[in-house]
Image (tube, helix red, strand yellow):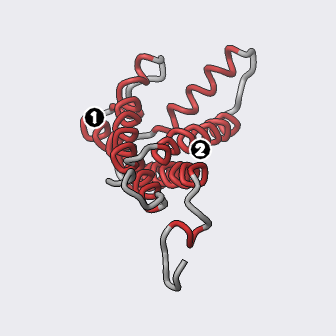
């Protein structure tokens, strides 16, 4: 490694597992940051965390437990962090991580908009309006692109890896 090299080796190597973990972290952090910023600053912003709380409470009820609001929120956030991190880590496993990240983000965005009513979690958190649905889709798409960009930056250099 030459002096001033800021490639994958500068951040600890370009191993596949590390690349996937870093991509997952980037995707999870992006969607979480966008959701929190939007929730605090944009009227009518998607409230995906409410979907998580509803899901956790439904699972707890099926297990014969009642969760308070804070406890359900904590479990939902833990689930979000783990599931989003694992999902976006997939971008780091493909030879074209930017494309993979974009596809993963689009799938997650579509799922966030289309699945909640079918799962009995309600429509309002992510489909209150067309604008809310577009923001939800866009935030997950941005997270996928961020995951893909990190995986691309950490990719091994060679003919099999490109955009």
Who's the residue at 36% across and 55% down the image?
159
Q: Quadrant of the N terminus?
A: bottom right
**24 to 115, vertically: above or below:** below
Horizontal arrangement in the rendering, residue 83 relative to residue 96 (left or right): right
Horizontal arrangement in the rendering, residue 137 relative to residue 2 (left or right): left
Q: Nearer the viewer, residue 87 or 91?
A: 91
Question: Which quarter of the figure has residue 81?
Answer: top right
Instruction: Name the secondary structure under disc 1.
Output: loop
Report whether residue 79 is seen.
yes
Name the residue that disc number 2 marks.
81
Instruction: Name the secondary structure under disc 2.
Output: helix
Report whether residue 44 is seen.
no
The numbered disc on residue 155 is none
Residue 78 in the image: state x and y as whole percent: 65, 41
Horizontal arrangement in the rendering, residue 99 relative to residue 71 (left or right): left
**7 to 76, vertically: above or below:** below
Counting residues from the N terminus, which is met first, the one under dot 2 or under dot 1?
Answer: 2
The numbered disc on residue 129 is 1
Q: Residue furthest left?
A: 130
Q: Nearer the viewer, residue 112 or 120?
A: 112
Horizontal arrangement in the rendering, residue 44 relative to residue 83 (left or right): left
**94 to 126, vertically: above or below:** below
């Amino acid at each position: 490694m030459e002096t001033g090299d800021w490639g994958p080796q500068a951040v600890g190597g370009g191993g596949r597992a590390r690349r996937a973990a870093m991509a997952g972290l980037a995707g999870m952090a992006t969607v979480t940051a966008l959701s929190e910023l939007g929730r605090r600053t944009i009227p009518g912003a998607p409230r995906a965390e409410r979907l998580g709380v509803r899901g956790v409470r439904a699972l707890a009820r099926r297990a014969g437990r009642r969760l308070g609001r804070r406890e359900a929120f904590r479990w939902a956030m833990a689930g979000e962090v783990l599931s989003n991190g694992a999902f976006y880590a997939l971008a780091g496993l493909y030879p074209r991580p930017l494309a993979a990240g974009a596809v993963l983000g689009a799938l997650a965005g579509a799922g966030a908009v289309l699945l909640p009513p079918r799962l009995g979690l309600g429509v309002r958190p992510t489909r209150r309006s067309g604008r809310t649905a577009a923001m939800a889709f866009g935030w997950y798409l941005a997270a996928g692109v961020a995951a893909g960009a990190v995986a691309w930056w950490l990719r091994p250099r060679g003919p099999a890896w490109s955009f």
